[in-house]
Image: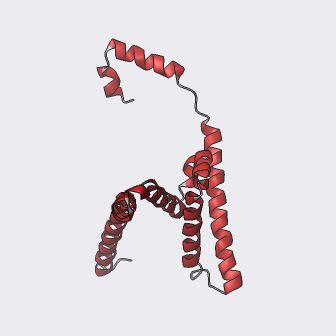
Amino acid sequence: MSAQKKIKLTLPQQEYQAFVKKREPKRPVLKNSLKAFLVGCVICIIGQVVKWFFMTFFGFTETAAADPTIATMIILAVILTALGVYDHIAQFGGSGSIIPITGFANTLTAAALDHRSEGFVLGVGGNMFKIAGPVITYGVFSAFAIGIIVVVLNMLGGI
């Protein structure tokens, strides 16, 4: 709580804040951090194994193996979300389960599954893209802004 908000609290509000603080359970920060780290590591190791698989058995270069690896990780996240397994992984690992590709796939799939009873267009599509829309918009805008910066720096003789 900020110092400004603390000053504006009335006496009963301050007493209530103290009451809540005494009874709030202590969070095991170190334990939760280790769980998140381990879950994130396992997801990344699986991704690296999949990439190695494509490089070894299909003869992809390291750069070329990235695309099928990403697609495979997305498919795995979607399947695990549909089966309800990803929720248990997220419950255990917390923020470690939000590795960008798998976490985003989980979020979109969960939104689609939650609203499938409303129909495919308005339920699945509409609610799925409520989540994806801001992410995609931010990504496109960021790429555009960085592209303009690179062009300007190239024109000035930088980079």
Taking 51 as reference, is 9 above or below it? above
Residue that extends furthest to the right in the rendered view of this protein: 56
Residue 154: horizontal and vertical position, in percent? 33, 80
Taking 1 as reference, is 133 above or below it? below
18 and 119: which is toward the camera: 119
Number of numbered discs on residues: 0
Residue for point 32% across, 19% down: 9
Quarter that holds the C terminus: bottom left
Residue for point 67% across, 85% down: 58
Residue 13: horizontal and vertical position, in percent? 36, 17
Residue 22: horizontal and vertical position, in percent? 52, 19
Residue for point 64% across, 53% down: 39
Relative side of 101 to 30, left or right: left
Place residue 32 in its image quadrant: top right
Residue that extends furthest to the bottom in the rendered view of this protein: 59
22 and 79: which is toward the camera: 79
Residue 20: horizontal and vertical position, in percent? 47, 21
Taking 114 as reference, is 152 above or below it? below
Quarter that holds the N terminus: top left
109 and 37: which is toward the camera: 109
The chosen color scheme is: secondary structure
Relative side of 144 to 33, left or right: left
